[in-house]
Amino acid sequence: MTETPRNGEYDDWLDSIEDGEGYYVECDEGHGWLPPRRVCPDCGSRELHDEPLPDSGEIVTHTTITVATPQFEDDAPYVTAIADFGPVSITGLVRGVDPEDVSMADVVGIEVGERETTGERAVVFRPR
Amino acid sequence: MTDPRIAGAGVTQFGKHPERTGRDLFAEAGLEALDQSGVDPDDVEALYYGNFMGELAEHQGHQGPLMAEAIGVDAPATRLEAACASAGAAVREAVKTLRNGEADVVVVGGAERMTNIGTAVATDALAIAADDLFEVRAGMTFPGAYALMARAYFEEYGGSHEDLAHVAVKNHEHALVNEHAQIQKEISVEDALEAPTIAAPLGLYDSCPITDGAAAAVLTTDEYAEEHGLDAPVAISGTGQGGDNLALQDRPHLARTPAADKAAHEAYADAGIEADDVDVAEVHDCFTIAEVLAIESLGLFESGEGIHAATEGTTTRHGEMPVNLSGGLKAKGHPVGATGVAQLATIAWVLDGSHPRADAVPDGTVGVAHNAGGTVASTTVHVLEVKE
């Protein structure tokens, strides 16, 4: 089987999280984004640089998905959440806790896990 | 400047038609629109066509010329894709083409075939409207995305799943007399609350069905309608479009829809109206929470108040501001690429009195259609007015 090409900057970003050196992209006006970015969508600045991703984030919304797509059928039910890391918010799968125990404002760390169904990498949040 | 007239419209029966091809669905809607309009097909100068997932569901790209051929129109055809707002975007292009004088008569429409690929694969296909890298790979589905918005809304403004259940009950009731509607079934608040969860807190009855269908309308300039003696009292007087970050995580607010705010402001300014002037609305209720967000963005209710509108009865057919008299996407169905024109057809029929729910707005002269794509990253709003 042919190997799927990497999604360049996205996979590099996952590598950085795996290596404990997660980062985000910040413009010279202080707006934060996830890579790849060549221009800040908020202010149009092209002066972008990498900054260390904060060590933890806070869940701002979450859902337990019971009816999944084929790509996630063996993962279901699973929790997808958006966590606010300060300069950026990130979407990830919440692992290491029962779905019913996930709450707003939970503090989570970020790591890279695998989808049960396909084995592909995914952003994972674990409660602190 | 012309306010394009809606000379005729056609909508197929929305529902599960897995063996019907998109080209035949669109032919049915388009030919009905042409027949209703009384326009000579040779006068049609362009087709603007909405479709989202034809490549995935039918292995068919480049659908514009195919659909023009299907309705017997020899004119340039352009397919527009803005996820679920594809047909709304098509209407906007059609309006601009008539206003700028490039054409006197155009057909606008859309179609989607979805049930042939099954619910799970259709859910997967729909998800490509989200950010693949940062959302889909983290498990996002569209029920999941709107569930995230619902929870954020409850956190910021209050409200409950029961309030959302009232939206579902209302729209199902509205659909009971709509011959085009996929679900003509009355439900109770209890039914909605007890239905299986799909993405917490949203359940089966918070979600629109997977739908096959098509819709089309014939639009003409004022001058053409008058010159040809067309019976076309309803005009599109305002058009607006707004955009937002694709991914939910990149937005400052998860409980608002700024793209729809922008589209509404633009459409109202274009039409010279204010929210208070609106008599009736068809909005994008792909999930119950989406209707709440929509009616707030349209300025019909304040932020945080839209959640109570169905519970209090304001948005029912007996209320002061009927919303989704067609049954909405929730009960009428949501063939993605067709929805924006089906909404337009509904408002036109309500305002001209021919819709089975027209009695809800007996003196209505202004309607709005709100069509949203993705998690409201694209939105179009159109204002329709009686111009007789």
Image: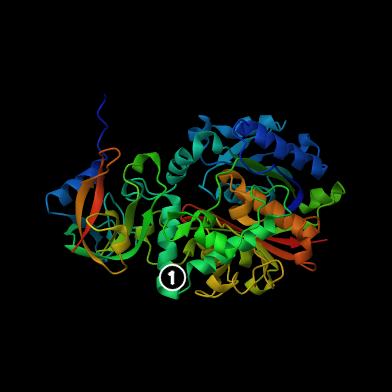
Q: Residue at the spot x=24%, y=60% of the render?
A: A26
Judge whether B257 appears above or below B71 on screen. Answer: below
Q: Which is nearer the eye, B321 or B133? A: B321
Residue closer to the observer: A11 or B326: B326
Could you tell me residue B261's position as x and y percent?
52, 66
Compared with B157, B84 (above or below) is above
Coordinates of residue B326 in the picture (x, y in percent): 68, 56
Q: Is residue B2 visible?
A: no
Residue at the far right in the pictured view: B229
Q: Residue at x 12, y 49 (%)?
A: A19
* Residue B41 location (% of width, % of height): 77, 35
Q: Which image quarter holds the N terminus of chain B? A: bottom right
- Residue A58, placed above or below residue B112: below
In the rendered structure, the answer to whether residue B303 lies left or right of residue B2 reads: left
Which residue type does callout 1 highlight?
A: Phe
- Asked if one can make out residue B116 in the rendered structure from this viewpoint, the answer is yes
Q: Secondary structure at mark 1?
A: helix
> What residue is shown with label 1?
B154
Q: Position of residue B210 (x, y in %)?
A: 55, 44
Q: Quadrant of residue A6?
A: top left
Q: Kindly identify which chain the residue marked by label 1 belongs to.
A: B
- Image position of B239 (left or right of B149): right
